[in-house]
Amino acid sequence: MSTLQDAPPRQLSLPVATLIGLLALAAALGVGHLVAGFVGYTASPFIAVANYVIDHSPTAIVKWAERTLGTWDKPVLKIGLAVVLVLLALLAGQLSRRTPRAGQVLVFVLGAAGVAAVYARSDLGQVSLLAPVAALVAGLAVFTFLHRIALPVDVVDERGFDRRGFLRAGVGVAAGSGIAAVVGQVAGTRTNAEDSRAAVGPLVPARTAPPLPADADFAKLGSPPFITPNADFYRIDTALVVPQVRAEDWSLKIHGMVDREVTFSYADIRSRPLVERRVTLTCVSNEVGGPLISNATWLGVDLADLLDEAGVRPGAEQMFATSVDGWTCGTPADVALDRTRGAMLAIGMNGEPLPVEHGFPARIVIPGLYGYVSATKWVESLEFTRWDARQAYWLSRGWAEQAPIKTESRIDTPSGFAGVTAGKVRLAGTAWAQPTGIAKVEVRLDQGPWQQATLSAEVSKDTWRMWWIELDVPKGTHQASVRATDQGGYTQTENRADPAPDGATGWHSVTLDAR
């Protein structure tokens, strides 16, 4: 006769244990997202942990991601994080086939990680901690509840497993989690900056940029257009979720080493005479020949006018800018104050209010410096201080304090390893040396003599310049290289350097297969 001691150890089947782990994860994320919709959208545990990974990844990994993934780094991060969470949820289920204790501990650890990630965010208040705490409680509660249904303590074999009851509970948890996530998404995105942006209306400059000459670019010959359309303008930032800031809610505070702290609203800025200025922005992460450079017509006010009202004190070394999402940027104070450099607080881009993903309601644009020290989007604070008092986001990760844009050039067409017809081959491309300006561009085939290319009209020393040339290319495989000389007499170096810590160098080359 069988006794209780003779009965085999009770345990969940693999599918049931797996489902419990996944449903607990869904409940945690759904409830966390729901609460975050009301206390701070980026407090959603998934988003908070992803932002923590972005902010605390080792510099080597960050550089690899930028070099390998480019603008796909954030989607890949989201997918990777989702995969890790699913695997951990599966592990929690498998560790708890006989008793829930191990899985409960793992669920608690995951929930605590969400709490820590939110606590570490400088742009989130204490009330935002409600989101990850709610996620932790929901995950633990669902895991324990489903485990008790699937493996009740008062039975000794699987005949006590209420399959229908477990299925009903599982469907209920899944549906509730989905509804919670949807409600949280709707609530969290109810502040729609696009509506505010649309209400801004036309922005009319008091000082317009000079008309573009007909030969500002050689787009018909293969160069990019002189003005980059907003939809094509490169975007590099750390924002996992694009900040949604309404113009009527935005303000800019200038403080720190100033005679008087001043705050400007969007209406204050828009009511001022607006200036239109064409400026090329360049990312320090751009590899030789890379695409992370674009040109736009910006509309806004001279930053120096705003700074004069605050009265920046002698001894201030950096303008420490902060975005609404907590990202920080350190700009040399002397450059920000130099009226000849044309630093702007921009509210318009290519004839319309700033696109949300490019900084609406307002951003900083400073010619001649790489973006990580000059181009804060969604800016809300400018603090004047010393370098040793505050370290900006990228400076604390090993990038350079001073970051003037280097003289560079690239070949845009033909592309690398392109098949071409032997004979006359047209090459076209781009060169830049903000704010010095490009004097000449030279191209050579293999180790042959350098030949001077035809330059487009110079629109501004703060913008890129296009070029084209025809080369005699015999049959076979050849390498075409380009180099630029700026108006200060400097010719870009052949020596290759990585983007870190202050911008890439080297000649851009493409391989041509002439038939």
Image (spheres, rainbow, N blue to C red):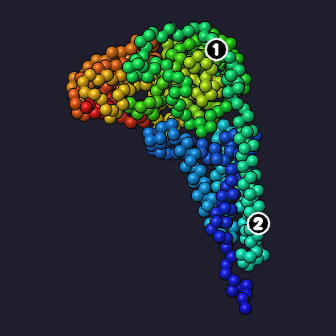
x and y, in percent, of residue 125 in the image: 71, 39
Residue 44 makes an appearance in the image? yes
Q: Position of residue 274 (x, y in %)?
A: 61, 12
Foreground residue among 39 and 292 = 292
Characterize the local packing of mark 1: few (<14), some (14-19) or many (20 or more) Cα atoms within 10 angstroms. Answer: some
Please name the residue that numbered disc 1 is placed on. 203
Residue 387, relative to residue 347: is it above or below? Answer: below
Q: Which residue corresponds to the image point at 42% horizontal and 36% vertical from the top-left? A: 500
Residue type for callout 2: Arg
> Residue shown at 26%/31% (left/top)?
514
Q: Where is residue 434 in the image (x, y as percent from the top left)?
A: 43, 20
Q: Which residue is drawn at the image coordinates 71% and 41% (left, top)? A: 185
Please say if 296 is above or below 191.
Answer: above
Image quarter of the C terminus: top left
Residue at the spot of label 2: 164
Q: Which of the 4 image quarters holds residue 416?
A: top left
Q: Give the x, y percent position of residue 129.
A: 72, 46
Report whether 82 appears left or right of 134.
Answer: left
Q: In this view, does 214 lie to the left or right of 200?
A: left
